[in-house]
Image (cartoon, rainbow, N blue to C red):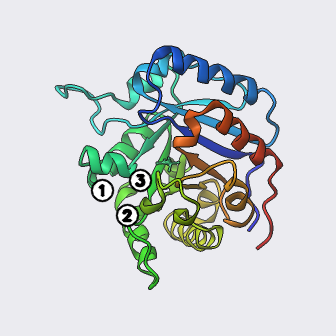
């Protein structure tokens, strides 16, 4: 399956790996240098809220946040709204990451609210879905469909054009061991299935504008397999995105990748 997009999208999810403002600035600078050389790749830096205003959009580089509030305004101590993020230059937000679902107890309903709040102010939403355990009986497909439909509840076709779906099998996140990473072959099956669900929900024209990414222990050594044989339009990278060296190699591998007709 050939990607319909002219550029692959690599999202860096810095999580809590970057410890200080100085570290964040140094990593950002090295990403700026690589971004200027890219021809077939663009990136999003999904950084902690406190670093967002230190990041500036560049060619092939977009500024993202790792979460967004479902609330629009009001007495919600500690929340950060989609509108606030947009006002400081953020264009992309992650919603429904499994770590937010686990750590902050985000429910499918709240994720759907977050998706709508962010799309409503014109942000791109990187919506994460994925099964907790790898099943051999096809039940992973059922889990992902249920999660996708619940997280997209009430999202209209008009807004859906700004969606990006990240398929992240939870068992493969932070695994960092070659054997516990998903294979391009099973990612391909899931990517096709996700596209079918999007097609059924939003029709061909809109569904074809929605990128599908793979996430879960992506590294310089395995990125090409996913891009070339996994049927995805890019990747969501956690741990390896916090290392300038590894992330640069991932971007270079992406530049050299060719999606095949599989
Ligand atoms: P990982 O994280 O690359 O460290 O597995 C991916 C993610 O959780 O987005």
Real-space Cα separation, disc 1 to disc 3, in angstroms: 13 Å
Judge left or right: residue 232 versus residue 69: right
In this rendering, the label closer to the viewer, 2 or 3: 2
Q: Quadrant of residue 68?
A: top left
Q: Name the quadrant of the C terminus.
A: bottom right
Judge left or right: residue 260 versus residue 48: right
Indicate the position of residue 50 as horizontal and vertical percent values.
40, 20
Q: Quadrant of residue 78?
A: top left
Q: Secondary structure at mark 3?
A: loop
Per the rendering, the mark at residue 155 is 3
Query: Nearest the camera: 248 or 215?
Result: 248
Query: Nearest the camera: 242 or 260?
Result: 242
Name the residue that disc number 1 marks.
108
Q: Secondary structure at mark 1?
A: helix
Judge left or right: residue 154 versus residue 53: left
Judge left or right: residue 248 versus residue 72: right
- For the point 43% across and 68% down, the residue is 144
Name the residue that disc number 2 marks.
147
* C-beta proximity under 8 Å, tags 2 and 3: no
- For the point 56% across and 47% down, the residue is 236
Real-space Cα separation, disc 1 to disc 2, in angstroms: 7 Å
Q: Name the quadrant of the N terminus.
A: bottom right
With respect to residue 33, does 180 lie above or below?
below
Identify the mark nearer the N-term, 1 or 3. 1
Identify the mark nearer the N-term, 1 or 2. 1
Indicate the position of residue 176 as horizontal and vertical percent values.
53, 53
Task: Categorize mark 3 by other alpha carbons within 10 Å: few (<14), some (14-19), many (20+).
Answer: many
Residue extending farthest to the left is 75
């Amino acid at each position: 399956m050939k990607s319909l997009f002219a550029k692959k999208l690599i999202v860096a999810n810095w999580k809590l790996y970057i410890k200080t403002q100085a570290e964040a600035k140094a990593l950002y600078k090295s990403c700026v240098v690589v971004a200027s050389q890219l021809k077939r790749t663009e990136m999003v830096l999904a950084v902690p809220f406190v670093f967002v205003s230190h990041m500036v959009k560049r060619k092939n580089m977009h500024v993202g946040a790792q979460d967004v509030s479902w609330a629009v305004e009001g007495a919600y101590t500690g929340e950060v709204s989609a509108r606030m993020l947009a006002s400081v230059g953020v264009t992309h937000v992650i919603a429904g990451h499994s770590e937010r679902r686990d750590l902050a107890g985000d429910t499918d309903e709240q994720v759907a609210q977050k998706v709508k709040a962010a799309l409503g102010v014109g942000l791109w939403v990187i919506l994460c879905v994925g099964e907790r355990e790898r099943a051999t009986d096809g039940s992973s497909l059922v889990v992902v469909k249920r999660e996708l439909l619940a997280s997209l509840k009430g999202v209209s076709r008009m807004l859906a054009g700004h969606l990006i779906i990240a398929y992240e099998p939870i068992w493969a996140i932070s695994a960092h061991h070659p054997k516990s990473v998903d294979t391009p072959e099973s990612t391909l099956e899931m990517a096709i299935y996700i596209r079918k669900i999007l097609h059924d929900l939003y029709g061909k024209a809109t569904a074809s504008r929605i990128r599908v990414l793979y996430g879960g222990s992506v590294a310089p050594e395995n990125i090409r397999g996913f891009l070339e044989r996994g049927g995805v339009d890019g990747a969501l990278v956690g741990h390896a995105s916090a290392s300038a060296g590894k992330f640069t190699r991932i971007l270079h591998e992406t530049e050299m990748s060719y999606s095949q007709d599989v």
